[in-house]
Amino acid sequence: MPWEWKAIWQRVVKRAWLTYVIYVLIGVILYLAMINAALPDTVHVKLHDIARYDIQSPVEIVDQETTNNLRRQASANTPTTYVFNKDTAMLQVEKTGDIFNVLADLREKKQTANDAANDAHAEGNQLKAQKAAKLEDAVKDAREKLKNTTGGKLSDDTLRTLLSVSDRDFALAQEIANSTIYDTMMDKIKWADLEDAQNKAIRSIPKSVVNDDLTAALSDILRYAIVPNYVFDAQATKKNKEDAVKAIEPVVIHQGEVIVKKGDLITRDVLHKLKVVGLLDNHYKILPFIGLAILVAFCTMLLVLEFKQLKQKQGEPDTSNLLMFLCIHVLIVVLLELASLLKNVHVNHIEFVVPVACGPLLMTILLSKRLAVVYSIVAAVSSGYIFGGNSGAFNATMAIYVLCSAMAGALVWRESRGRLRYLPAGLMIATVNVLAACSLHFIKGGSIHILELGMEIGVAFLSAFLATVLTIGLMPFFEAVFNILSPMKLIELANPNHPLLRKILIEAPGTYHHSIMVANLAERACEAIGANGLLARVAAYYHDVGKTKRSRFFVENQMNGENPHDKISPHLSKTIIMAHPYDGAKMLKEAKIPKEIIDIAEQHHGTTLIKYFYHKAKEEGGEVLESDFRYPGPKAQTKEAAVVELADSVEAAVRSMKHPTPEKIEALVQSIFNDRLEDGQFDECDLTMKELYTVRASLIETLQGVFHSRIEYPEDLPARKIKSG
């Protein structure tokens, strides 16, 4: 990339708005990946067509129309409930008796009136007229008195007949009426059967003992008195119909249910089911898109909050970290989409081959384990809809498998050196994948199908292998593009054959040995406080590379005992010594060494005073400013830089001691620590006092092990005595 483009890119990366753009892109990519969940799943079939393939329901839904039809049919088929009231017979007999009682009273009054007319010796025609008038008056009185009882249902002829017959016939008529009514109404009589029951009762009248007029009168009374006694029960019928409707379960079309098989005829019932599940509806609905947007917003917010947590832990996150996450996110989405296409192969669970674990594994190595865990959940949710198809179908099996595999990728990584560290991670992912595949197979079928299970185990193992290979293959890409200082990169930089390390070894061997000692001290001290020991070791290797420009001006490289500083002024010596951190930083930049190592090389002297030449200048006289003899800095910005600075100082100081003892070493290290603290060299890094004490103890322990006192071997004693003598 040309320098001007690189400068432009650096300015763009530092823009605050870019962070929000990346967040939006993460959500948009997730939304587009799951867009099928909001799209209607349609088929193109017509009535009486032949199905070209099995058509399954994409959703689980209640067929409300069919359910309502079945319930209406059940209600209609429920028989009507009737109640048989035996007391109705006696009630009607009593009503008939009341009628005969009223008529009996009127008959008695009429007879009294007739007797009075007889006593008056009226003429025959006159007497007949009077009796007829009395009869009509009795009929009128009977109709009036029986109005509330019979409701005017008895005809005048019936009343006239019963009022005019002889007492024997009247009593006989009453007896026949009562017995016939009672006998007839002891059977169940519906409204529909009423006329037949009445006619049957009328036919039972003994014609041999009653005349035609009385038969007609009795027929009229029987039609009035015989009523239905097996009547409709509205409340019971309603309850029975309600119970019948409730007994009809909703007709459910289950997700995955085969609506029509390949080669079957498309009937009206099939078309109805296809319409219910939405397979014939090609109209887009807004609600699924809104629902998907809410889900994506929730998932994206989880990731945003996790980045906020990362910011609180590690400070302001580099935008390049977000870009790196975006690249991994795109990679996983593409892998899931490609794996979803494997469903067309028609091999059970061939989609288990998706190497989804590589995403969380890369995030754990490059970003944060916690972020990888959160992303595993998001990937599992999205995969459920990606593999579910259209119309919001959710593939729970694939979601669970992706969750297990992705979680394995996020959690199994352990820091170690060498490429073989990927092997245990890959084996752990393979184990989790296989166990997840087996559990899902057992849950699904309830029985073991050897061939199918073997296939699932094979693709699950292949998924782990592909995830590991992808991770190994992509690591150099991310390291190069995003300038990431990964453990693997550090191991490569620690190779003694690196050109810069070879340069130090050849041109400044004393500095090389000093750097090795500083690296040992710094690594152990960093590991004691939980800092990056490998970074400290590699940075220590390169921290004095700037000395190679004028190696003979540094005491560790003066093998012949000649010190060039004796021939130059303290100010020039100071300039030469002071330049080596910045010369080293420049050389490291030119060699494209990662920024973290360059920063440590530039900061490893902070703003400390070059005391030797400062005091030498003062001894020579003249005005000498202390600031002129201080390194321009910057001070140590990280724990690793501070530890390398301390290790560099104490190693050089202890090496200059003539007869180091544990007590002298401890006192010297303590003195240097106190001097750095009082000078404020650690004010700009997050190294705590507790960690400083731990670093001091580690350095003292390591130095005492290196510069321990040696015992005198027996063969050395005579030589020493001769020499002393």
Image: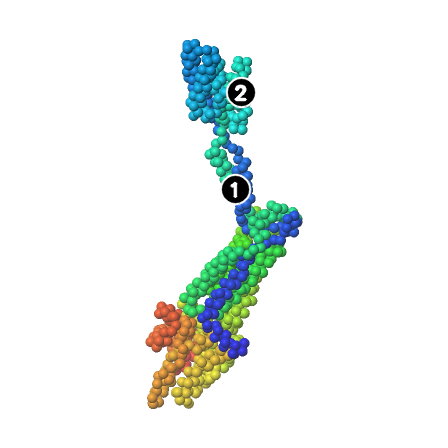
Q: Which residue is mark 2?
A: 202
Task: Locate residue 277, reporting x and y percent.
Answer: 56, 50
* Residue pictured at 61% horizontal, 46% vertical: 268
- Please name whichever residue, 575 or 725, is drawn nearer the observer in this view of the structure: 575
- Where residue 249 is drawn, which disc sits there? 1
Residues under labels 1 and 2: Cα distance?
A: 52 Å
Badge 1 element: loop
Judged from the image, the secondary structure of the residue bearing numbered disc 2 is: helix
Give the residue drawn at x 44%, y 75%: 600
Residue 109 appears anywhere in the view? yes
Q: Is residue 482 above or below residue 177?
A: below
Amino acid type for the residue under numbered disc 2: Ile
Tags 1 and 2 in contact by the CB under 8 Å rule?
A: no
| Residue at the spot 54% in from the left edge and 64% down from the top edge | 331
- Give x and y (percent) for residue 316: 43, 69
Percent from the top left, x then y, of residue 663?
A: 35, 73
How far across and how far down the image is residue 30, in percent? 52, 61
* Three-letter residue code for mark 1: Glu
Nearest-to-viewer mark from 1 and 2: 2
